[in-house]
């Protein structure tokens, strides 16, 4: 082999090695940067998507909450002008009110018995059975006063029986429905 | 003809020249490698590293939005419960308002009877909790004559506050040596207060 040929071969090796090293450095650098950017971009896009979703849910939630709060406000305003419903735990106090009213009208109350609470209807109701005797006129006055003073108690059934033709004495039996405060009825 | 040529003789040994050329190229490549590293390598590492390590702030925003979302979500069931109770309260108010007013019913029954009729029994029931069922009123009374008993029934009909008034039975009875007409009337009111919109205003 001529000397020149060997020399050129050595130079070629240097060029190849130098070029390869430069290429490796440049390639690795570009690959590393590109790969990191691509990963970062992926993470960013995923986070962006997640953020968009969370914001969408948040907006829906805010909308729902605002709408509910508005409805609550409207109903609270309406309720403020209505009669005040009494919680069922004040059952004894309520029976005292009924009996006091009856006795103030000279109705002889034989019994005022609470029945099983009704919870399976549109509204919760506490029934009472009222038994007593009085003058016929007094019972009508009693019904009027009940309606005025305790409008949340409705007379569901009434049975007035005259005990004598010669007098206006009657025996009365009533089933009363007390519309209790629904907030307290389920407790 | 004489040629005036000077033949140049390189006295540096060829091997040394080749070595020098190799060294020069190696130096050149060293510089090229260094330049590549500085111009491309280091910026690439920097960009890649920065991309990998830099926080976009997105996760913080997500966390914040999530927290706010959770806060709203917690408030919603509370509001729904509040709304349910208020709606239930409204239903109670509606039912209370639409109940039959017994005071008015009894006032009509008594007013129409005047002083001629005596009641033995008045029984009223129905309507249901929701006030949507018919109400039945059963009256048992005593009248001096058939005419008065039947006139009473007609009077009740004419009050226009009842949906149906039916005279069930009349019989003659001796009470305390006086003959009286015992009569039974059944009155129907449909749909609670809705059936109570008659002209008679006997409050």
Image (tube, rainbow, N blue to C red):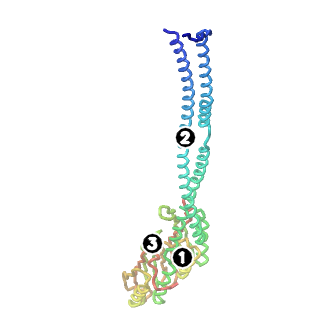
Along the line of sight, the residue nearer the viewer: B170 or A80: A80
Outermost residue toward the front in this view: B1
Mark 2 or mark 1: whose residue is earlier in sequence: 2
Q: Where is residue A2 shown, x and y percent of the image?
A: 50, 9
Q: Quadrant of residue B5?
A: top right
| Callout 2 crowding tier (Cα within 10 Å): few <14, some 14–19, many ≥20 | some
Q: Which chain is home to disc 2?
A: A
User: Relative to residue B201, is residue B43 drawn left or right?
Assistant: right
Q: Which chain is home to disc 1?
A: A
The label on residue A133 is: 1
**Which secondary structure, mark 3?**
loop
Q: Where is residue A163 shown, x and y percent of the image?
A: 49, 79
Residue annotated with mark 3: B127
Residue drawn at point x = 54 percent, y = 10 percent: B1
Mark 3 vs mark 2: tell me if same chain. no
Along the line of sight, the residue nearer the viewer: A166 or B64: B64
Along the line of sight, the residue nearer the viewer: A89 or B185: A89
Q: CA distance from mark 3 to mark 1?
A: 25 Å
C-beta proximity under 8 Å, tags 3 and 2: no
User: Relative to residue B92, is residue A97 drawn left or right?
Assistant: right
Q: Is residue B28 visible?
A: yes
C-beta proximity under 8 Å, tags 3 and 1: no
Q: Which chain is home to disc 3?
A: B
- Quadrant occupied by the C terminus of chain A: bottom right
Q: Quadrant of residue A103?
A: bottom right
**Which secondary structure, mark 1?**
strand
**Which secondary structure, mark 2?**
helix
Residue annotated with mark 2: A41
Along the line of sight, the residue nearer the viewer: A148 or B181: A148
Above-or-below relation of A165 to B42: below
Above-or-below relation of B131 to B144: above
């Amino acid at each position: 082999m001529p000397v020149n040929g060997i020399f050129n071969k050595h130079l070629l090796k240097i060029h190849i090695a130098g070029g390869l090293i430069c290429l490796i450095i440049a390639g690795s650098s570009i690959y590393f940067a590109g790969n990191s950017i691509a990963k970062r971009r992926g993470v960013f896009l995923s986070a962006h998507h997640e953020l968009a979703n969370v914001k969408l849910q948040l907006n829906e939630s805010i909308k729902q909450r605002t709408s509910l709060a508005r409805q609550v406000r409207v109903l609270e305003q309406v309720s403020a002008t209505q009669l005040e419903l009494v919680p069922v735990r004040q059952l004894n106090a309520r029976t005292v009110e009924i009996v006091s009213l009856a006795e103030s009208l000279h109705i002889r109350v034989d019994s005022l018995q609470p029945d099983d609470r009704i919870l399976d209807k549109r509204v919760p109701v506490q029934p009472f059975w009222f038994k007593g005797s009085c003058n016929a006129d007094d019972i009508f006055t009693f019904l009027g006063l009940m309606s005025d003073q305790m409008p949340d108690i409705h007379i569901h059934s009434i049975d007035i029986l005259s005990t004598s033709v010669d007098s206006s004495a009657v025996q009365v039996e009533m089933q009363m429905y007390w519309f209790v405060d629904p907030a307290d009825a389920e407790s | 003809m004489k040629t005036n040529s000077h033949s140049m003789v390189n006295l540096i040994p060829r091997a040394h020249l080749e070595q020098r050329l190799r060294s020069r190229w190696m130096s050149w490549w060293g510089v090229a490698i260094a330049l590549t590293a500085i111009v491309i390598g280091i910026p690439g590492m920097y960009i890649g590293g920065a991309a990998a390590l830099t926080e976009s702030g997105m996760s913080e925003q997500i966390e914040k939005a999530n927290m706010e979302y959770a806060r709203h979500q917690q408030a919603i069931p509370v509001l729904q419960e509040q709304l349910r109770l208020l709606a239930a309260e409204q239903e109670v108010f509606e039912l209370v308002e639409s109940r039959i007013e017994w005071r008015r019913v009894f006032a009509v029954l008594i007013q129409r009877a005047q002083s001629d009729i005596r009641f033995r029994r008045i029984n009223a029931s129905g309507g249901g909790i929701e006030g949507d069922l018919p109400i039945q009123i059963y009256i048992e009374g005593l009248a001096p004559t058939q005419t008065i008993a039947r006139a009473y029934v007609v009077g009740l009909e004419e009050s226009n506050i009842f949906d149906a008034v039916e005279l069930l039975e009349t019989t003659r009875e001796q009470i305390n040596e006086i003959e009286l007409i015992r009569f039974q009337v059944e009155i129907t009111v449909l749909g609670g207060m809705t059936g109570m919109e008659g002209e008679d205003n006997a409050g």
